[in-house]
Amino acid sequence: MIFTHDIDVLTGEFRRERELPGGHLSQAMSDDGWSPSSWRSFPAKQLPVYPDSCALQYYQQVLQQSPPLVLASEIRQCQQQLAQIAEGRAFLLQGGDCAESFADCQTTSVRDHILTMEQMAALINQASGLPVLKIGRIAGQFAKPRSQPEETLDGVTLPSFRGDIINGREFTPHGRTPDPQRMLRAYQHSASTLNLIRALDPSVFTFSPAPQQEHVHPGLTEQYYRSMHRQLQGCYPRINDQQPRQPLFTSHEALLLPYEEALTRRDAAHGRWYNCSAHMLWLGERTGDIDFAHVEYLRGIANPVGIKCGPAMTQARLLALLKLIDPHSTPGKIVLIARMGLAHIEEKLPALIQAVKGSGHPVIWVIDPMHGNTSTVVSGHKTRVFATIVAETQAFTALMHQQGVHPGGLHIEMTGVEVTECTGGLQQISDRDLTHRYYTACDPRLNRTQSLELAFLLGQSWHHRV
Ligand code: PEP
Ligand code: CO
């Protein structure tokens, strides 16, 4: 049931006013029993428990009555471009924060993200000759699954931080309590980030073409740095010439289902349901069980859907997921995001590739070389080693070629800022350097130099293959 609410000015609490006709967010149900709210009948993992269910319903209703963030026509355009990757004629670059934070949705960070993605795309394009489709982990990547539901500090135990859309990072009972008003703030931050994405034109930015040389470790691989620099400069005319400019599409993990449900709309022209909070959504490693709520939700929307495939993924589960989420074998619908880790990729991935090949689903395989390669150093910082990330990316490309499958792209956690969160790379960031600029709200990201370097090295391996 949906209720309208007023805030009681004296207590700050929500008061139920009157019942709206029509019941829950959406009554319309497809023939196969799916509706935007049908996930509610399934067991769910990783969802917060909101102490005030009336407030939750109120904010869901506010969102449901708000304009869509992206349009169904744009989502279809994104899928058409993904279909080209499924045919081996393009490449996907998907990147951004592990978790966006409300505090960091600023002009400069959005600009630097766009610029870095643009330059990475140009490097990959120059080496492979393929068009590069850019999808940001941006304008909505606010919810995080956690391995531990609670965190204990100095003998005090509180709920874990689950992303700014759910609760706060500050370690206080108030901060860690899930607050549904945060969904509205996430929507507003996503809207202003999207506004910038649509307005900013990278060809008019003034920026230095490559990472500043002083950022590069002295005496290190000078020649290598210069060759990357030269190649980036060679890309400039291409970046500036792109007419019309290829837009950055948006994506996030479809984790917080009350939010996703509220932004799900039926497209009047086609009669299909679209999640209008992002162009592409993905199913996380921790919520991918068949017959659970997240899979139920994702099977009904017409957006392209990513599926994270970790070492625990089996052929049977993957095929069952494909049957549910992509029943009509639609090109550009499914992006399989391998996140095995360097230690497992060669053992685990080939069987999955073969099973999917045999199923006939025209999927796109991409590599997430971040999530299977996380470690914690003595200072307590979570980090990732650049050389391991490169090695898993290259192992993926080699395995795909061995299987005769197009290595469709790269899914990474990165930022356009020179943070020190992952070690290694041209700057030779060490474990001790991690304390300098460790800003991530969740997992460690490649910084601008490391992102460009990864794109450069990926391009090099393409180049040597051809
Ligand atoms: C993520 O992409 O931030 C994430 C949590 O990934 P995974 O579900 O693969 O662990
Ligand atoms: Co992450």
Image (tube, rainbow, N blue to C red):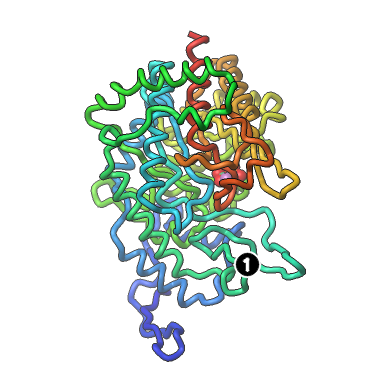
Counting the numbered discs, the total is: 1
Return the x and y of residue 83 as percentages of the image width and height. Answer: 38, 29
Residue at the disc numbered 1: 171
Q: In the displayed structure, would residue 62 be above or below residue 449?
A: below
Q: Nearer the viewer, residue 2 or 81?
A: 81
Q: Quadrant of residue 116?
A: top left
Q: Nearer the viewer, residue 265 or 175?
A: 175
Q: Amino acid at mark 1?
A: Phe
Q: In the displayed structure, would residue 263 be above or below residue 10?
A: above
Apparent side of residue 149 relative to residue 19 in the rendered image (left or right): right
Q: Quadrant of residue 239?
A: top left
Residue 361 seen in render: no
Return the x and y of residue 292 as percentages of the image width and height. Answer: 59, 53
Residue at 37% across, 31% down = 208
Return the x and y of residue 128 as percentages of the image width and height. Answer: 43, 16
Q: In the displayed structure, would residue 120 be above or below residue 300?
A: above
Split into quadrants, the picture shows ligand 2 in the one at top right
Residue at 54% across, 65% down = 167
Residue 28 seen in render: yes
Apparent side of residue 278 relative to residue 241 in the rendered image (left or right): right
Q: Nearer the viewer, residue 113 or 11?
A: 113
Return the x and y of residue 63 as percentages of the image width and height. Answer: 36, 64
Q: Quadrant of residue 353?
A: top right
Q: Secondary structure at mark 1?
A: loop
